[in-house]
Structures are given as C-alpha cells and as structure tokens.
Amino acid sequence: MQEIITRSKEKTVFLPKKIKKAILRCGGDESMFNDIIKQLENKFKTKPQFTTKDIYTFVKQALYKTNPKIALKYSLKEAMESLGPDGFCFEKYIHHCLKELNYDITPNVYINGKSTDYEMDFIAKKDNISYLGECKYKNSKDGKVDINAVLIAYASFIDILNNPTYTTENSKRIVITNTRFTTKAIKFAKEYGILLMGWKYPENQGLETYIDDNLLYPITIFSKTTTDVLHKLVKEDIILAKEFLNVNTKSLSKKTNIPENILNQIQQEATLLFN
C-alpha cells in the first residue's frame, strides 16, 4: 500500500476511496475517478513520497483538464480555508449563506446575560426560533475546533437564558466552522443541546452538503481570488460566488482597483460553475 505524508507530517496509508467520494460529490463519475487513479498510480512510481497536498493538487489539475466545473467544486475545502487569514470573511460568508436560506440575520449582536453581556457573531431567526451563532474560522494548520469552543458557547447560553427574551423554547446556540470538530466537542454538544455545523458534520448534513445543495460557493473557489482580491470584494459586500454572475466588471474594477481582466476571468469561472 502506498504511504503518504499528512499535513501534520505523519505517515498514513493512501485511500483512493476518499478521492472517489470527493469526485462523485462534485458531479464526476466512476470512469473519471478510475482514469485519475491510474494517472496517480503512475505518478507514485516516479516519486517515492507524496503528501496529501501533492495528491490534492494532482487530482485538481487532472480534473481541470477533463472538466473545469468539477475541478472548481473539488476545491471547495481549500476555498473555505482561504476565507482568512482572520475570521472576518468567514463570518461575512456565513451571514450571506443564511440570508440565502431565508433566515432573518442580525450580525454582531450583544446580548445581556445575568452576569455580563455576550457578543454573538449573528442572530439568525426563522420559524420563530432565534439561532445565537458563533463562527469559528480555522486554517489548515489550526486543526479541529475543540471542546473549549463548545464549552464557552454553552456557558454563555446558560447565562443568556436569564434574559427573558431568550428561552429554551425560542432560542438555540450554534457553532459553525469551516473545518471539523473534535470527538469530545461533538459528544458534549449532543449532551447539552448545542448545535454544531462544520465540515462533514452533522453526518450527511455538514457544511459542504449545504453549500453544494444550495449553490453557496464562496468567491475563494475561483482561481484568481487572491487574499487581496477577496478583501476588496468583501468591502463591496460580495462573498458568494453566485453574487458575481451579474457584476459589471468594468465598474467594479474602478471601485476596487482590481484589474478588469482578473474580474472578467472570475466572472467566466462563475458562469462555468453555475451553468
């Protein structure tokens, strides 16, 4: 079995089924997967040691040659990690996603508890339920969201429930992340009623599923969205890929100082993604 090196510099066995699952999620088929695996196996013969990043890059490039639309979707996890370097862009992205899902959103709200006040990254209201939200952005080096984040969310919620506006009947506490939760964080959240949403969690209803099902791709999914381009577009309240479809690139270029040819290339990829 082929060994590969993970991001944490640990050796592990290469599992083709993970690539297969990702390709099928993006709209690819068995034939496409088999062809890419054959190419990858040949590549293994010429290079003794591969990293997970090497494999991701190879598969993405192979997909671009056969189906650029699928390649864009395949890069979703990387796109989510690119909503940095701090948590601001990720928060903005979640706000826009919730609006698209018909939630009434109030961002960055202070709520009084019994002992102190608490800043929520958002309050999302739907069907008479208020979701008091915390966004936890992490890049690839930060790892998973651990139990401490859930403990803090739980403790603040207990205190907030002393405020007569919020009750266990009309309010829920939720933590949303672009990455995964630790096993302990998930166990505690289940026990004490804290909602979690992250990469591949809840099972079959994780963040990536909501994004795919509702076409809520971030603008970082495009190849020309550098960190500088991202922050300039966010200033213009553009964070979802679909928001780029009807943009006047000439006008936007003047506002943001992003070269018009870059914006045109992003728009071309947006048209490809949603075609």
Image: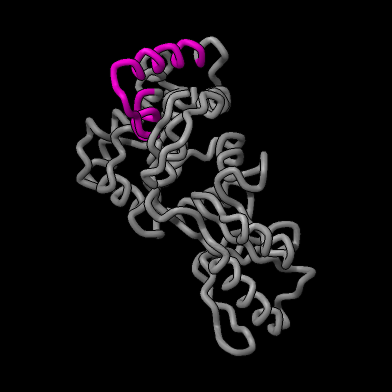
Question: How was the colour assigned to the protein in this rendering?
Answer: one colour
Can residue 186 be spotted in the picture? Answer: yes
Can residue 219 be spotted in the picture? Answer: no
State whether the magenta stretch is mostly helix, strand or loop.
helix
Q: Which corner quadrant of the image does residue 191 belong to?
A: bottom right
Q: Observer-nearest residue: 108 or 136?
A: 136
The x and y percentages for residue 185 are: 61, 61
The x and y percentages for residue 131 are: 65, 63
Give the answer, above or below, for where 207 lies relative to 137.
above
- Relative placement, left or right, of 144 versus 251 is right
Give the answer, above or below, for where 271 lies relative to 263.
above
Q: Which residues are magenta?
A: 33-58
The x and y percentages for residue 194 are: 68, 64
Residue at the extreme front of the image, as rendered: 1
Residue 39 among magenta residues: yes
- Relative placement, left or right, of 227 versus 30 is left
Residue at the extreme right of the image, as rendered: 169
For the point 63% across and 50% down, which residue is it? 102
For the point 47% across and 28% down, which residue is it? 14
Residue 235 among magenta residues: no
For the point 54% across and 69% down, which residue is it? 148
